[in-house]
Image: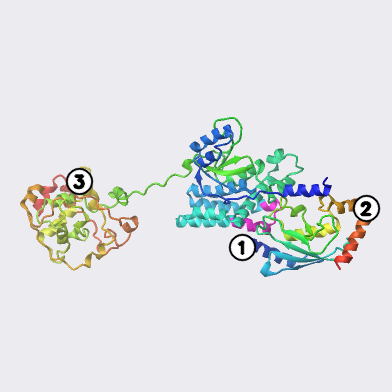
Amino acid sequence: MPSDEEYAQLQKLSDDYQPEATGPLVGERQSSSAITTEYANADLVYRIKTAALPQKYAYFRTCRGDGHCGWRAIAFTYFEALLRAGDVNKFDEELCRLQSMGNLLVVAGFQEDLIEDFRDEALDLLRRLAASERSMDGTSADLLLQTFNDYGASMSIITYFKLLASAWIQSNPDDFVGFLLDCPDIKTYCQQNIEAAGCEIENVSMAALAEVLVKPAGFGLEVLYLDRSPGSEINNTFCIEPTNQDGVPVQNAPILRLLYRPGHYDILYRADDFPSPVPQPPLQVALAGYTDEFVPMSSNLSEVMTMIPGMFPTGLGQRWPSVSYYDSPDPAPQPQIASVPTYVPAPTPAAPVVASHHDFVHSIHPNHVDHHQPPSLHNIQLEPPVTLPIHHAPPPAPPISIERTPSMSIERGGPFRPSMYELEPGFGSGQVHPSPFQTSIFRNSHYNTAHFMNPEFQPEEWSPDSEYATGNRGRHKSTSS
Amino acid sequence: MSTGAKKRIMKEYAECAADTPAGMKIIFDEQNMTKWEVLLDGPDQSIYAGGHFKLEITFPNEYPFKPPVVSFKTKIYHPNVSNDDKGSMCLGLLRPDEWKPPNKVVSVLRLIQTLLIEPDIDDSIEPSIANEYKENRKEFDKNAKDWVKRYAK
């Protein structure tokens, strides 16, 4: 017969026994079908409920069951929700808000020097996440997971949140006093059930934490209870709706979602909590709306120019570095042609050249709605790529006369005799060249010839004559040249 | 041990060194800061007066999220100190389920002093000594003083 002393010893051993909790403090996000598998041999109710789980909640994340999993799950999802909210400024807001709650803790009787280590860990994580988001280095999610898998860091953050919850209850006793079962007073309750290192979250502290941390951040909190209650899916939830400062419900706000199984909390996600990244549209798409911002010449230009014999777009030469930007149906002679306009000596322009330049200016015309070469719109209005200034560097190639086959000029049509100087058919009508440098940065840089700081900047000219050229461009130009 | 825990221990030591409770001396080794040696004089108003007790305070790796461990290296006849080679003291705020991370070592040291003056009989680790304290206080006092003479001089 064991003595009282031995009984006491055994009782103590049994009280002190704690199964060794394993696994990461916070795990990687994984498919929630793993939960279904876990319950494959369990009670029918569990089987049914867990089978329905992945349809609604596609992912989950484990938290180590070391007695802090509920606190840890809320703390982790709070930071994660800040990341998910996709607004870097939200980090600063939360930083300020948490810092401003120092008084709440002091009023509850916590000494500043005792809580600062815990608080600093939480604030530091906010700062680091904000910095990572700002620099868009894509490491913020890893940083969060790493921090929460660091025992000291995650426990500090959890302790800070516990103290916040405790302070909140103590400063709003009326909201909670009715729920404290057989506890003499609020202070004792908080000390024994919240502040003590080993105590798991329960409903009162969870409600307090939601009030002090989750709701003011504009997030919601949802806890799904997976238990044996009858039903075809998880039907027991604790839910706090996301609201704004005025208490008005907010749609689409991040929800911190926990899965509760008796004695343990994990983190749960809906599939749409993590939208798949939208593929970046190709850059030239961004040029589409550019027409109205910068129109030094109309899209009709190329059309008109090809109809004028001996036409060199001298004025444009600097703007059209090379025809080779455009895919041509007849690529072979193109590069040669391209060099022609470029190297016409500027000081001694031939008369037709001047005229053509003039015409070019005249041809400014707002109605490109009716033009029949949609791709050329982009061609003409493309600003030269960044390589443009280098354009002067290559040794000047002499103008090259092009052997034209008669068939080509016939194809081209138009009322004029073919000329060796005219532009290739299809000039300027090629596809938009996917120029990788057409960024807004380049658009605003002085390397852009359309920028007034560029030495080659050619201001737009207005000539009253052009007003008359609209209806009848082709003929008008032919007479002037 | 994490840097946070080290920082915390350093901070607490600085505080203890600046304001050591009366009748106490803390020996701190920076190379092994998780083990503090405390030399404690038996409080004057207690039966342990005149004794000098050596204590060891060990900080777990999880400190301050788990409580420090207190053990008497000097044998002491006390209901709250285990009568074995560990001489462990584990009650009140030192219990893992009652320990709060914002607690400080200094409050642990004060608790020890208070317990020497007045043992906590309801939370004893040595039921036979606690019994004696309750029912035969004279015998308890005699034994305690005897042990002080034998081990703590």
Residue A82, percent across and down? Answer: 52, 49
Query: Quick check: is A353 in the magenta stretch?
Result: no
Q: Badge 3: how crowded within 10 Å, few (<14), some, or many (20+)?
A: some
The residue at which mark 3 appears reads as A373
- The prevailing secondary structure element of the residues shown in magenta is helix
Residue B44, percent across and down? Answer: 88, 63
Residue A177, percent across and down? Answer: 71, 40
Query: Quick check: is A107 in the magenta stretch?
Result: yes
Q: Are marks 3 and 1 in contact (CB under 8 Å)?
A: no
Give the camera-side residue of A153 and A184.
Answer: A153
The residue at which mark 2 appears reads as B136
Q: Which amino acid lies under the numbered mark 2 shown in the image of this protein? A: Asn
Per the model, the C-alpha gap separating discs 2 and 3 is: 112 Å
Q: Which residues are magenta?
A: A105-121
Q: Badge 2: how crowded within 10 Å, few (<14), some, or many (20+)?
A: few
Which mark lies nearer to you, 2 or 3? Answer: 2
Per the model, the C-alpha gap separating discs 3 and 1 is: 68 Å
Q: Are marks 2 and 1 in contact (CB under 8 Å)?
A: no
Give the camera-side residue of A352 and A329.
Answer: A329
Q: Earlier in the sequence, mark 2 or mark 1?
A: 1
Residue A212 seen in the figure: no
User: SS at mark 1?
Assistant: helix
Q: Which mark is residue A242?
A: none
- Residue at the image position 85 percent from the left and 57 percent from the top: B78
User: SS at mark 3?
Assistant: loop
Q: Which amino acid lies under the numbered mark 1 shown in the image of this protein? A: Thr
Which mark lies nearer to you, 2 or 1? Answer: 2
Q: Badge 1: how crowded within 10 Å, few (<14), some, or many (20+)?
A: few
The residue at which mark 1 appears reads as B3
Chain identity of mark 1: B
